[in-house]
Image (spheres, rainbow, N blue to C red):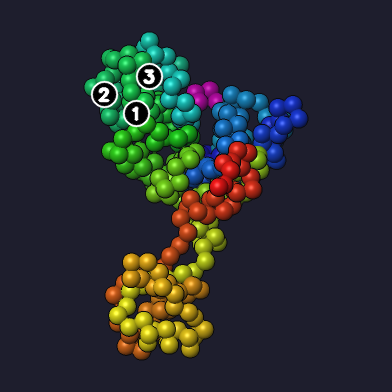
Amino acid sequence: MNRIEIRQLTKAYGTTKAVDRLTFDVLPGRVTGFLGPNGAGKSTTLRVLLGLDRATSGTATIGGRRFTDLQQPLLRIGALLDAQAAHGGRTARDHLLALAASNRIPVRRVGEVMEQAGIASAAKRRIKTYSLGMRQRLGIAAALLGDPGVLLLDEPTNGLDPEGIIWIRELMRGLAADGRTVLVSSHLMSETASFVDHLVILGQGRLLADTSMAAFIDERSTPRVRLRTSDPIRLRTSLAQQGLQLAEGDEGRWTIDGALAEEIGVLAARDGIPIFELSDERASLEQAYLDLTADHAQFASASR
């Protein structure tokens, strides 16, 4: 019921295809990161899914149904696309009351979601007096209003302070743990890496990756070990017997390419070589993402 299904989705503006034969699923029970360079087609896909744009061909459905066919859509899907969209002259409470009335949502939910989003004390303030972070919290409260099984969040941490970022991270993980479908679009790779389980990555309107985050990073990482030892000479000799080389790193550490920490730990223990620090090095999500999308960015800075 909460599965998002994108099938051969194409959206063209004249001769330009913003989305080109796109197919992927977003499953419940996990947080899915929706990534891609500017112009990759992420916003267009979300707009088609929410009935704000009409597909040229293909389908975008929630539980097998189009958003425009849902009688009370906020009970099925909550979305935050633009935190600035709420009318500035309304109070936050009135804004949420209007949304609740449009979908026959009990009035009590307005107070509940404002409390959940941490803005209950500002319920009667006009939205134009809200900071960016407060507007972001209001947008998230609106997305949660119908207690939906599907959440679409575009840059949910934008404008939030550190406490707010921790809150939204835990919220998304909690919603996924409840069996809901959570799709999050973001440009902040370090933050995205802290909460997503799965990745869907677009480039120039096409699907580049649909995989778990762990597998995505592993596929784009060359095995490397970092360590500290008091006896690099003996370690170098032991490694040479295995066809490995010890290279000097920074801050008194050494690196070994093409190996795993577990293998080096066993080798050092066997030969009685003291090891004070030992860890695997993996590419960050940002490094892996940039490696994949380097040839698919519509806009890129010139390297010096």
Tell me if residue 232 comes above or below residue 104 in the rendering: below
Q: Residue furthest right?
A: 15
SS at circle 2: helix
Other residues around mark 3 within 10 Å, as few (<14) / some (14–19) / many (≥20) = many
Q: Which amino acid type corresponds to the residue marked 1 in the rendered image?
A: Gly
Q: Which amino acid type corresponds to the residue marked 3 in the rendered image?
A: Leu
Q: State which tag comes first along the sequence, 2 or 3.
A: 3
Q: Which amino acid type corresponds to the residue marked 2 in the rendered image?
A: Ala
- Asked whether the beta carbons under mark 3 and mark 1 sit within 8 Å of each other, the answer is no
Task: Select label 3 or label 1 by which is in front.
Answer: 1
Q: Is residue 238 left or right of residue 57?
A: left
> In this orientation, does residue 28 appear?
no
Q: Which residue lies under the disc numbered 3?
A: 96
For the residues labelled 2 and 1, the Cα–Cα distance comes to 14 Å
Task: Select label 2 or label 1 by which is in front.
Answer: 1
- Asked whether the beta carbons under mark 2 and mark 3 sit within 8 Å of each other, the answer is no
Between 52 and 268, the residue placed more toward the observer is 268
Question: Exactly how many numbered labels are in the figure?
Answer: 3
Q: Residue furthest front?
A: 304
Q: Residue at x 44, y 32 (%)?
A: 148
For the residues labelled 3 and 1, the Cα–Cα distance comes to 17 Å
Q: State which tag comes first along the sequence, 3 or 1.
A: 3
36 falls in the magenta region? no
Other residues around mark 2 within 10 Å, as few (<14) / some (14–19) / many (≥20) = some
* Start-end of magenta stretch: 69-73
SS at circle 1: helix
Q: Is residue 24 left or right of residue 124?
A: right
> In this orientation, does residue 281 appear?
yes
Q: Which residue lies under the disc numbered 1?
A: 133
Q: Which residue lies under the disc numbered 2?
A: 120
Q: Residue at x 32, y 83 (%)?
A: 231
70 falls in the magenta region? yes
